[in-house]
Structures are given as C-alpha cells and as structure tokens.
Amino acid sequence: MVDKPTSGSLFGIPYNFEQPSLKRLLSTYWQPGEGMLVEKPFGIGYTLNLASWRSWVVLAVAGGLYYQQSGSVAEADVEDDEPVEVIVED
C-alpha cells in the first residue's frame, strides 16, 4: 500500500494535513523574517503572518469594513418600513 503524503504542494499551492501542535501554530503565525503571507499550519493555502505590519493593516481595514457594514444594517432596521410608490412611464 502506498502512503499518501500529508504535506506538500499542488499546482503551487501548499497543503498540510499533519496534526498541528501548539508550537507549530504559534511559529507559523509569527515569522519575523518572512513576508505578509505564510503557509497555513493546517489545511490548504496561505495565512497572514502577524509579525508583518502589512498584516495588521489588512486586519484593521477588514475590521473597519465589518464595523461599518454592521452599523449600516442596524440603521436600516431602525428606519420606518413604509410602502414606496413606484411610477413607471411607458
């Protein structure tokens, strides 16, 4: 029987299905000498390197957009739900 590899790369996208340890999780998300994206400790693809300031900018922008979107949903719930008259000209 041939053993299937638990980690590697397929079409340039890394994968790793080995059971993660706490040390490997922490060392994956904090790599000071690397770029903004690093290989995931478990699964397929890449994740953010929290040692890079660019990752914090991405997280701040995503958090700001989420906050703005959740605020606009709350405002939409407060508005009156009155019927709207639509006039269509031929």
Image (cartoon, grey):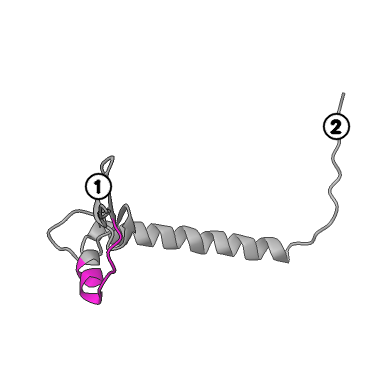
Q: Say what amino acid the circle numbered 1 marks.
A: Ser
Q: Earlier in the sequence, mark 1 or mark 2?
A: 1
Residue to which mark 2 is pinned:
88
Looking at the image, residue 19 sits to the left or right of residue 79; the answer is left
Q: Residues within 10 Å of mark 1 (few under 14, many from 20)?
A: few
Q: Position of residue 36 (x, y in %)?
A: 24, 54
Q: Nearer the viewer, residue 89 or 33?
A: 33
> Circle 1 sits in a helix, a strand or a loop, which is it?
strand
The residue positioned 42% from the left and 58% from the top of the image is: 62
Q: Nearer the viewer, residue 4 or 90?
A: 4
On the question of residue 5 being in view, the answer is yes
Q: Quadrant of residue 54?
A: bottom left
Q: Residues within 10 Å of mark 2 (few under 14, many from 20)?
A: few
Q: Position of residue 61 (x, y in %)?
A: 39, 57
Q: Disc 1 to disc 2, how far (Cα)?
A: 57 Å
Q: Quadrant of the C terminus?
A: top right
Q: Nearer the viewer, residue 2 or 46?
A: 2
> Circle 2 sits in a helix, a strand or a loop, which is it?
loop
Q: Say what amino acid the circle numbered 2 marks.
A: Val
Residue to which mark 1 is pinned:
9
Looking at the image, residue 85 sits to the left or right of residue 62; the answer is right
Bounds of the magenta span? Answer: 16-27
Furthest-left residue in this view:
33
